Amino acid sequence: MSKGDDWNAAIIEEFRANGGRVGGQFEGAPLLLLHSVGARSGKERVNPMMYQAVGDAYAVFASKGGAPFNPDWYHNLVANPEATVEVGAITVEVRARTAQGAERDTIWETQKERYRGFADYEASTARQIPVVILEPVG
């Protein structure tokens, strides 16, 4: 298991033990667990991530800490947009789509205003960080 996997596993465990609340760098931030299907492996993957409520949907951000390439979970959602999220104590089936244009820009600017780290991620990469909308199904 990689260091990143260990880190995610600890956050996932804390999230589930505390009804969706965690401490550390995510304390007080809106956090969800994204269940996606691996684009190549076909295996379920679970990733904790910050989100922004957008109506009844959830916006998540493929920042990967400002890395020059998108995170694996983003590629998984592009290949397999049907996913599930755990938000607090509820589980919701969702369909993912990448926000474009003014919709993306509005959500992204709000996220940067609320959480300065996202502006730092943007400044450290040449790519446009995708904003993914997770819309409840049904």
Image: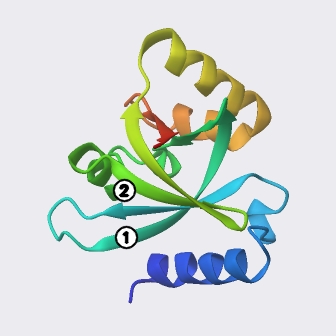
Question: Dot 1: few (<14), some (14–19), or many (≥20) neighbours within 10 Å?
Answer: some
> Of label 2 and label 1, which has the lower sequence position?
1
Circle 2 sits on which residue?
A: 73
Q: Quadrant of residue 44?
A: bottom left
Q: Quadrant of residue 83?
A: bottom left
CB atoms of marks 2 and 1 within 8 Å:
yes
Identity of the residue drawn at 44% across and 36% down: 125
Looking at the image, residue 27 sits to the left or right of residue 56; the answer is right
Residue ranking furthest to the right: 28
Residue lying farthest to the left in this orientation: 40
Q: Which residue is mark 1?
A: 45
Left or right placement of residue 9 versus residue 84 in this view: right
Identify the element where label 1 is drawn: strand
Q: Secondary structure at mark 2?
A: helix
For the point 79% across and 77% down, which residue is it?
A: 18
Residue 104 image position (x, y, % from top left): 51, 21
Q: Amino acid at mark 2?
A: Trp
Three-letter amino acid code at disc 1? Arg
Residue 65 in percent (x, y) is at: 52, 51
Residue at x 49%, y 44% (from the top left corner): 63
Which residue occupies the extreme top position in the image?
102
Q: Residues within 10 Å of mark 2 (few under 14, many from 20)?
A: many
Give percent across and percent down for residue 75: 27, 49
Q: How is the image coloured?
A: rainbow
User: Of the numbered discs in the image, which one, if any, rests on residue 4?
Assistant: none
Task: State the residue at coordinates (37%, 70%).
Answer: 45
Q: Quadrant of residue 73?
A: bottom left
Q: Position of residue 66 (x, y in %)?
A: 49, 44
- The relative height of residue 103 versus residue 52 in the rendered view (above or below) is above
